[in-house]
Amino acid sequence: MLFLSIVCFVIWIGLIFFHGKFWSKGPILSALLPEEQAEITAWPPVYIVVPARDETGTVREVIYSLLTQDYPGKFHVILVDDESQDGTGDLVRKMSRTLPDAINDRLTVISSAPRPAGWSGKLWALSQGVAEAEKRKDLDDAFFFFTDADIVHQPTHLTALVHKACSDKLDQVSEMVELRCETLVERALIPAFVFFFAMLYPFSKVNNRASSVAAGAGGSVLIRRKALNKIGGIQALRSALIDDVTLATHVKRSGGAIYLGHSQLACSLRPYPLLKDVWDMITRTAYVQLHYSLILLGVTILSMILIWIAPLYLMLTTRGVIKVIAIVTYCMSIVSFLPTLSRFRISSLWALALPFIVLFYLAATIGSAINFYCGAGVTWKGRAYTEVEESSVTNKQVASEDAKQGIY
């Protein structure tokens, strides 16, 4: 028990002080001050590509928020209706007829062609949006902005993203948008999702050009056209089921500079009111994230037990020096979660539930592996993906690099 308590303590010392400050509140992009906006005199054109499949509940608000950006340069919104069954594309077309011409001219709605074999649905839709943008002539210094049809943007968002890319000479700027945290289930589980993501991919390591750690958040990705072309375009990612991390990995390994942070200027409208909703979100890609590896699954289970469960168990069941070490370790684990709770503006008392929240995530991760071996694969928006993802970065290469970084 003494050895176990010391192991847990040493792990948390390493996580707190030597794992990229994953627990911190930032980095966060804020709206620009007037003097910051004046730093750029020639704003590059931006083409905003929004893949949408059965999103009538949110798409109108999302598209309007994009069309009314205060971006000083030229920008255009391309909605790709990805074989929706609920009339998503028609709803946006109808909405466009009610807009002033100055705003309506910024919008193009296209219908997706049937998805070819070997493509994920979202990436196929993105590729068609990019192809539509490529018909324009002002593409030399252009950016693409990929965002989802359930994310609304404050008017200053696009300007802040492009300013970050231009001022820091970045090839990709991505943000974890604010997620809904209103229901009991959301307050209990959603902050932990962001916390664990940052633990897996510490943002400071992602943003360090000397580090090989790469990650992105698919709801908000600004990328230079030249950087996208350099990696072979969307075609290079075509079957990736975790497209945001795969895209960032390609860009960084090609020599590009990337940024990942938290957003104050964009938020998701997608609700997760039930435990099943969060369970499905995790099981959809958790085993994909582990590269379909039983070894990595085992390492993940052991790591989560040592990091979260063992300190609480030792604190409640032991005495003397072991109990003291366990209490200190448990306190470190709880305190590390507080900045995330603060960012979500919810009670710090939720940190006390973290070991039990971990059990839910651990069970869902195991459930994701069970789904894979039972042939269920990944299901999203009525589509099932049962084949292991393939890309120019193989699963073995990614797993090897991740292991070197100690991400797992």
Image (tube, rainbow, N blue to C red):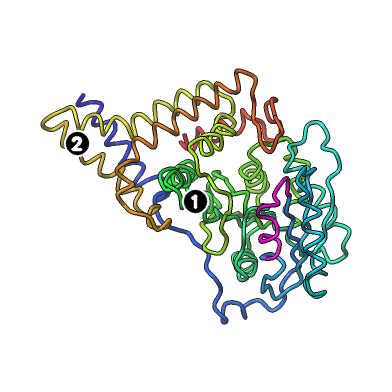
Instruction: Say if mark 1 contacts mark 2, CB within 8 Å.
Output: no
In the rendered image, which quarter is residue 394 located in? top right
Tell me which segment is drawn in magenta.
Answer: 52-64
Camera-side residue: 265 or 326? 265
Camera-side residue: 391 or 118? 118
Of callouts 1 and 2, the N-terminal one: 1
Camera-side residue: 10 or 333? 333
> Which amino acid, by three-letter code, is at mark 2?
Ile
Left or right: residue 26 versus residue 104 is left
- Residue at x 20%, y 39% (from the top left corner): 327
Tag 1 residue: 203
Label disc, if present, on residue 399 of the rendered structure:
none
Give the x, y percent position of residue 179. 52, 52
Give the x, y percent position of residue 263. 53, 60
- Residue at x 32%, y 41% (from the top left corner): 353
Tag 2 residue: 325
Left or right: residue 357 versus residue 280 is left
- Residue at x 33%, y 35% (from the top left corner): 308
Dot 2: few (<14), some (14–19), or many (≥20) neighbours within 10 Å?
Answer: many
* Quadrant housing the N terminus: top left
